Image (cartoon, helix red, strand yellow):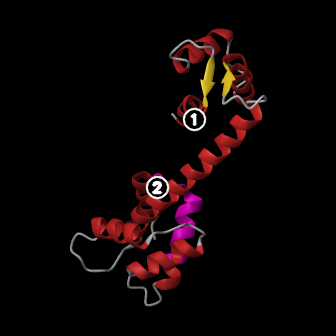
Amino acid sequence: MSDEVLASIAESTGLDSEQIDALKKGFDGFDKEGAGTISETNMQMILKSMGIKVDKAEIENAAAEVDEEGTGKFSLTMFATVAARFMSEDDEEQMKEELKEAFRIYDRDGQGFITTDVLKEILREIDSTLTEDDLDNIIEEVDEDGSGTLDFDEFQEMMMG
């Protein structure tokens, strides 16, 4: 497998080299004849073995989109395209859980919001190079109603872009 092919997979899927490497290992394990393709069932098995939650109907839909000719055979690039959907959804779910946990920690009184002063503290911890002006601009942007507080949805939107 050439570096160019791996680079194009990374570019088109947004997966990092570790993730692509893991997919390639699984792919190679099922492509015993070296035909360069695997089946849809193999794709499901590889993803499950990697601990990625896969809904059968969802993978069938994703597979059908990349298998335009309906051959039922998937190259590594096609497999990575399908896998990327499930891998990034997984990451997003995990990130939401981590954000909920962080929000709970900073919402010390359990009121369902954090103050903009607490948000400034968080932002300073994340990036110590931010100036007071930077912080004020960020606060102005995320605290649209000027209430001086952020609920979880506003906090999540800011953190996830």
What crowding class fits label 2: few (fewer than 14 Cα within 10 Å), some (14-19), or many (20 or more)?
A: some
* Rendering coords of residue 62 (x, y %): 35, 65
Front-lying residue, 115 or 8: 115
Front-lying residue, 86 or 104: 104
Residue 133 lies within the magenta run: no
Q: On the rendered structure, is 133 left or right of 118?
A: left
What crowding class fits label 1: few (fewer than 14 Cα within 10 Å), some (14-19), or many (20 or more)?
A: some
Residue furthest bottom in the image: 33
Which segment is the magenta one?
A: 14-27
Q: On the rendered structure, is 5 left or right of 110?
A: left
**Residue 156, labelled with which disc?**
1
Hey, which quadrant is residue 140 in on the image?
top right
Q: Main secondary structure of the magenta part?
A: helix
- Quick one: SS at disc 2? helix
- The residue positioned 35% from the left and 72% from the top of the image is 60
Q: Amino acid at mark 2?
A: Ala
Does residue 36 appear in this view? Answer: no
- The residue positioned 46% from the left and 65% from the top of the image is 83
Q: Which is nearer the N-term, disc 1 or disc 2? A: 2
- The residue positioned 45% from the left and 67% from the top of the image is 2
* Rendering coords of residue 138 (x, y %): 58, 18
Cα gap from disc 1 to disc 2, whole angstroms: 27 Å
Does residue 148 appear in this view? Answer: yes
* Rendering coords of residue 1 (x, y %): 46, 71
Residue identified by numbered label 2: 10
